[in-house]
Image (cartoon, grey):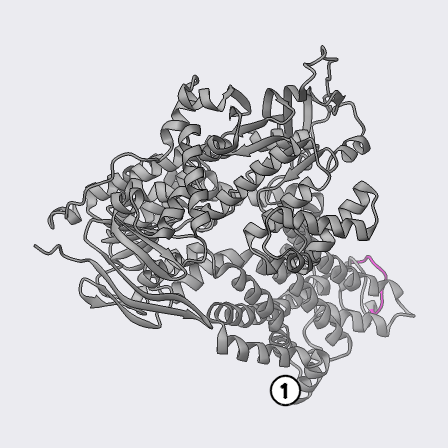
Amino acid sequence: MSDIKTVQAPIHAASQRRHFVRSVLTNPTGLLASVALLIVITAAVFAPLLAPNEPSTVQIFKVNAPAGDGYLLGGDGSGRDIWSRLLHGGRNTFLGALITIFIAASIGVTAGLFAGFYGRKLDLVARWISDGIMALPALIVLLAFYQALGASIYLSMAVFGVMLSPGFFRLTRNLVNGVKNELYIDAARVSGLSDLRIITKHILLSVRAPVVIQTSIVAGIAIVVQSGLEFLGLGDPSTPTWGGMLQDAFANIYVSPQAILWPGLAITATVASLVLLANAIRDRMQQGGVPVRMPKVLPLTVSDTLPGAAPDVLLDVRDLVVAYPANDGWREVVKGVSLSLKRGEVLGLVGESGSGKSQTAFAILGLLSPGGRVLSGSIQFDGIDLGKSSEDEVRSLRGRRIAYVPQEPMANLDPAFRIGFQLVEPMMTVLGISRAEATRRALKLLARVKLPDPERVFRAYPHEISGGMAQRVLIAGAVACSPDLLIADEPTTALDVTVQAEVLDLLRDLQKEFNMAVMLVTHNFGVVADSCDRVAVMKDGRIVETNTATELFAAPAHDYTRMLLGSVLEGGETRTYRPPMTEERRA
Amino acid sequence: MNDPVLVDCRNVNVHFGAHHVLKNVNLTIRPGETVGLVGESGSGKTTLGRAILGIGPVNSGEILFDGENIAGVPPRARKGQAAIQAVFQDPYSSLNPSMTIEDILTEPIVARRLASPADASQQVRKLLDQVALPSDAAERFPREFSGGQRQRIAIARALALSPRLIVCDEPVSALDLSTQARVMDLFIEIQEQTGVAYLFVSHDLAAVRHISHRVAVMRFGEIVEFGECDQVTARPDHDYTKRLLLAAPVADPARQAERRAAFRALEMTA
């Protein structure tokens, strides 16, 4: 995987941004909303040029006039041109919304950045204030201010901005809490950057996108509330606004019912576009990339009938190809892997990240990530062709005859349930035994994997035990049904080295006791030397070399294996300390 | 003749609530020296690194840098223009994903007004060259690089301010084997060129042996053994260091079988 990232052509900052904008616009919703908004905003900005009449010019004989005769959309209750008022009204409405957004965002985001970054008392006080503002009924406050301060809709919208600032505050504060412990913030501190610079540069960069979305939604709310206030008559009657037009049209609804349509449509279209645009940006961010289209023609799994494998062969994988959908067809991560595993044998599958070793294991388990497919090749387990078996048949093998031990023990235990429950439930389902019997067996297994106090672990929640203990629990669960094949994917990578030694000992003992075949996926040659009978070395989705462990370590045949073994930092001379020359230091 | 000492930690104690995370830690680092700090998870090795960097607390004790106590002093308030820098473990979260490599590398220089933005850009090329990355890397974003390359970028950022000590917190643990070896060699090469000292924090005794002059072993917040690299990593005195050494499997089936037997024998006597 890492290789693929590095071969990309250089991409410039500006093109990244363009890329983002383009992918929002290729989304049909995003495109529609952007076009609609662009039209409405352009119309509002150029209203004085576009409007055929002055918005306040009254022509008495055109009161409630139908469309035509110089008035594109007809006249309103006072004989003014609806079309011109609509254009000018947009201008005033947007100005009000801008005031609200500006005040809400600047108060909320600033407070959120500082409260989130410094935490403690500042955070506490800011949260009190924010909760206090949120508890106030916004509309009543606005009505009260209107009474006290007079008929300026802009003043009301400014007050409304303050009322909406807690939304920005809470959003920003939570985002900051998420990023402030990232290592790059530590690195910036170590470089000696001031807190102010860290906040305005590093933190603001990582919170900007959700804030943009929030802004779009708040703009919609501001327009609705502003129109609502004016509809109630709380605006300045001399300025044309969409809300004011609604009020006028409503007063004349029996005389000229169509007049209410135009301001209503303008408000609806604008607010809907803002919300849809916010959704489109959010969708784009959640995808994290341009959507990958599934290749149209799904290739079929080709599974040849195999000549009878040797009788002691338990697992026989031939020419396995695993692929994931990519922009231009399928990207192969396993490119024709063949391997076999005898009963009671331990095979090490070694390779670096992106070599396809885990994907091979997951293909055998039938647990490829979404989108992944076995494109060709065959997997035979004890004479059963897994490629031709149904989902149910594979599932019944999994857990019963093929067991799995994962890399991250903690991530594979459900934090909400006790350990005992997580062992007993699957045993009851898979083996069809009673709860009492399953409990008895589970306790026996926990003792078998050398957990010091099995009763206590059985009752414990996952967070109450260590990583090493959790891995023992998962191993207990894996061997519960005496499987024929155990697939362990980096089973000790997340553990401390002394715990690793103990867990490897345990795996080896259990392997002998149950005479299991084990496929041990690992990047660590020490672990291979410790536990494996045979080794397969993988690189870029292919096996480059297979041999017995003794021979492979004594005489690696492939260059890649030699390179890997040469990279093992083991033994060798240690360095001798020489104090540097003082002149050299700054060289 | 007494060697000069760059860093001198004296009886450093750190508490996190009821947890006594560092207990009377004493450690010295000489100029141009690598001191390996080995321990398992929760041993306090990262806490000590953060205390020296000034981004973690110190409850008592002194950390002398060039004879001056810097314990509990944040990096910005320290004299000597960021003489201590850091390379962290996770190459994915240690670079800001929304900044270009050039921005990442010039930020410390520009923000401290050590050079004009134009001069800083000039220096980027030199830094990238120093860590063996192509100069067109400057305009790209962190996500376009592999783990090993990101770690090289992090090293370049640490070098930007010409530090005298770099605290390396598990800098190669997240990397592939072959990448690990190359990054370790880069660390050594840079040390030989610039005379910077390293505190090399790791759980991997073999990696520590490869790069260190002296090694300290930590357990439960205490340094249980501190001495010459070869002695600590090949013939340790302390039982815990022996356990650590024998627990790490070697890439040779016959020798590993012996090592495993020795580890089991040690476990039995314990």
The residue at 74%/70% (across/down) is A243
Looking at the picture, how far across and down is residue B241, in whole percent? Answer: 36, 49
Q: Is residue B25 above or below residue A127?
A: above
Q: Is residue B43 above or below residue A27?
A: below
Residue B269 vs residue A251, the one in the foreground: B269
Residue A229 vs residue A14, the one in the foreground: A14
Residue density around tag 1, few if under 14, some if 14–19, many if 20 or more, within 10 Å:
few
Looking at the picture, how far across and down is residue A244, in whole percent? Answer: 75, 72
Looking at the picture, how far across and down is residue A468, in whole percent? Answer: 55, 50
What residue span does the magenta drawing correspond to?
A63-69
The residue at 32%/70% (across/down) is B72
Name the subunit of mark 1: A
Outermost residue, left direction?
B1
Q: Using the rendered view, name the quadrant where residue B77 is placed.
A: bottom left
Q: Is residue B174 above or below residue A199?
A: above
Q: Using the rendered view, name the quadrant where residue B165 is placed.
A: bottom left
| One can see residue A539 in this view | no
Residue A289 vs residue A316, the one in the foreground: A316
Outermost residue, front direction?
B269
| Mark 1: amino acid | Leu
Q: Is residue A1 magenta?
A: no
Q: Quadrant of the C terminus of chain A?
A: top left
| One can see residue A146 in this view | yes
Residue B150 shown left or right of residue A155 in the figure: left
* Most common secondary structure along the magenta stretch: loop
Q: Is residue A66 magenta?
A: yes
The residue that label 1 is drawn on is A149
Residue B231 shown left or right of residue A587 in the figure: right
Q: Using the rendered view, name the quadrant where residue A172 is placed.
A: bottom right
